[in-house]
Image (cartoon, rainbow, N blue to C red):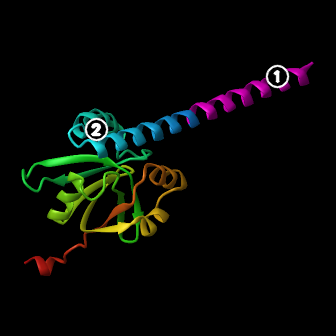
């Protein structure tokens, strides 16, 4: 009798885990589909881009940069306005810095701002990093830095370029004076 109760309990547990896996996989696929659609529409119609991406970015910024978030928050200064901006994006450590996905190509405002300023700040996994010396690199050099699920996402939404930014070197006290 007790063996029958245990097998029923195990069946329920495995059934619950199975449905949890299906739900998480569905959310991942839905996220990929939403990002693919947003990117496709925004690439074809630059006037619609802000209307589509502002609400999306506002939602993502609430979770980005946290200890377990798949998104980072890039803080940069506008090249014309001088204002501070924040952009949620995919980032991963590479060498002495981080590599950032260019979902909309090097024409994205955040990329142009970072390239013009030469510096930015990245909040990734709960920590902030001061970054400098941005350079655009191809997917072949950058994709290896990302986890497998992120590589899958970037490849399927068509990201072909990345920005590699290096951690700022500390200037010795004597050199500052």
Q: 96 and 29: which one is in front?
A: 29
Residue that extends furthest to the right in the rendered view of this protein: 1
Residue depicted at 40% across the width and 55% down the height: 159
Stretch in magenta:
1-24
Q: Quadrant of the C terminus?
A: bottom left
Residue that extends furthest to the top in the rendered view of this protein: 1
Residue depicted at 37% across the width and 44% down the height: 66
Q: Residues within 10 Å of mark 2 (few under 14, many from 20)?
A: some
Left or right of 17 on screen, residue 105: left
Residue that extends furthest to the bottom in the rendered view of this protein: 174
Mark 2 lies on residue: 53
Q: Earlier in the sequence, mark 2 or mark 1?
A: 1
Q: 120 and 127: which one is in front?
A: 120
Q: Pointer 2 and pointer 1: residues touching (CB < 8 Å)?
A: no
Mark 1 lies on residue: 8
Question: Where residue 163 sits in the image (x, y, percent)?
Answer: 31, 63
Residue depicted at 78% across the width and 24% down the height: 9
Question: Where residue 58 sits in the image (x, y, percent)?
Answer: 28, 35
Question: Where residue 33 sits in the image (x, y, percent)?
Answer: 46, 38
Query: Is label 2 or label 1 in front?
Result: 2
Look at the numbered disc 1 and give the secondary structure of its residue.
helix
Look at the numbered disc 2 and give the secondary structure of its residue.
helix
The answer to whether residue 55 is above or below residue 165 is above
Residue depicted at 42% across the width and 36% down the height: 34
User: Which label belongs to residue 61?
Assistant: none
């Amino acid at each position: 009798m007790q063996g029958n109760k245990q097998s029923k309990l195990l069946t329920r547990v495995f059934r619950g885990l199975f449905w949890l896996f299906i739900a998480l996989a569905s959310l991942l696929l839905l996220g990929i589909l939403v990002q693919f659609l947003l990117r496709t529409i925004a690439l074809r119609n630059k006037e619609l881009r802000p209307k589509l991406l502002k609400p999306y970015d506002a939602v993502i910024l609430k979770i980005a940069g946290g200890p377990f978030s798949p998104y980072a928050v890039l803080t940069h200064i506008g090249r014309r306005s001088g204002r501070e901006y924040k952009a949620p994006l995919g980032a991963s450590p590479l060498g002495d810095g981080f590599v950032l996905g260019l979902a909309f190509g090097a024409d994205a405002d955040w990329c142009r701002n970072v390239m013009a300023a030469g510096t930015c700040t990245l909040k990734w996994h709960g920590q902030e990093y001061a970054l400098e010396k941005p350079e655009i690199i191809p997917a072949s050099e950058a994709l290896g830095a990302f986890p497998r699920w992120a590589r899958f996402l970037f490849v399927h939404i068509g990201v072909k370029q990345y920005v590699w930014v290096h951690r700022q070197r500390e200037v010795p006290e004597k050199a500052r004076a």
